Image: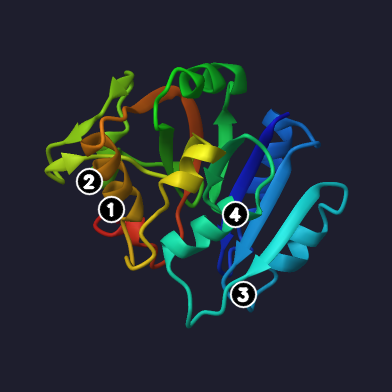
Amino acid sequence: MNLSVIIRNRNEERYIGYSIQSVIDFCGDDVEIIIVDNDSTDDSLRIVNTFDFLDITRVNIDKNEYSPGRSLNIGVKESSNDYLMILSAHCEITKFDFSRVKKQLDGGVGAVWGKQIPIWDGKKISRRYMWSNFEDKPSVNYYSDSEKRYFFHNAFSMFKREHLRKFKFDERLSGKEDRYWANDQIEKGFEIYYDFEQEVKHHYTPNGATWKGTA
């Protein structure tokens, strides 16, 4: 499969194995995976190493040099395939049709982002707050009334590599680099496509910014 998967990691031992296994289940074991690690001190890298039959590249960013955008840009630089998936280390793919996504990207959209189902310690929770943006219908350039800007979430998102090499994430931002990137893309005339038929379980992580206000 002509696909590289970029996974950012910082002490994600609880779910990173599930994340990688879901990539295998939907993309096969010939997929390229790039783990961009931020000085992890837990067991997550040992878990990554158990998938020794995969083509996995590990890159480390010193915690003093880390930013979300920089880690993604490094992952893009390390990738070697024409199509990219960015996947959160605590997301588990449940639906993915590469041929469908490839067709969308080949049609000229800047990015495709999929539906996320919030899972709190195994339990599906109501889609309030940020989660309410993941609707059960497709959308082009989805506008979030709650955030008052175009919405895009890169925990499960797909791109052409050449596009992300040209239009990088802002490395100065400490968060929401995905929203700023998407809004800039739309201003440049590109479309951002939400495909609810591509889906992940997004598992709860303590102190995760995505989960603020949900509990």
Return the x and y of residue 67 as percentages of the image width and height: 43, 68
Label 4 and label 3: CA atoms lie apart by: 21 Å
Q: Amino acid at mark 3?
A: Ser
Q: Earlier in the sequence, mark 4 or mark 1?
A: 4
- Element marked by disc 2: helix
Return the x and y of residue 30 as percentages of the image width and height: 80, 36
Can you tell which of label 1 and label 3 is closer to the viewer? 3
In the rendered structure, are the residues bearing label 1 and label 2 in contact, judged by CB atoms less than 8 Å apart? Answer: yes
Can you tell which of label 4 and label 1 is closer to the viewer? 4
- Residue highlighted by disc 2: 129
- Element marked by disc 4: helix
Label 4 and label 1: CA atoms lie apart by: 35 Å
Label 1 and label 3: CA atoms lie apart by: 26 Å
Quadrant of the frame with the C terminus: bottom left
Q: Is residue 129 left or right of residue 174?
A: left
Residue drawn at x 18%, y 33% as measured from the top left: 143
Q: Earlier in the sequence, mark 4 or mark 3?
A: 3
- Residue highlighted by disc 3: 40
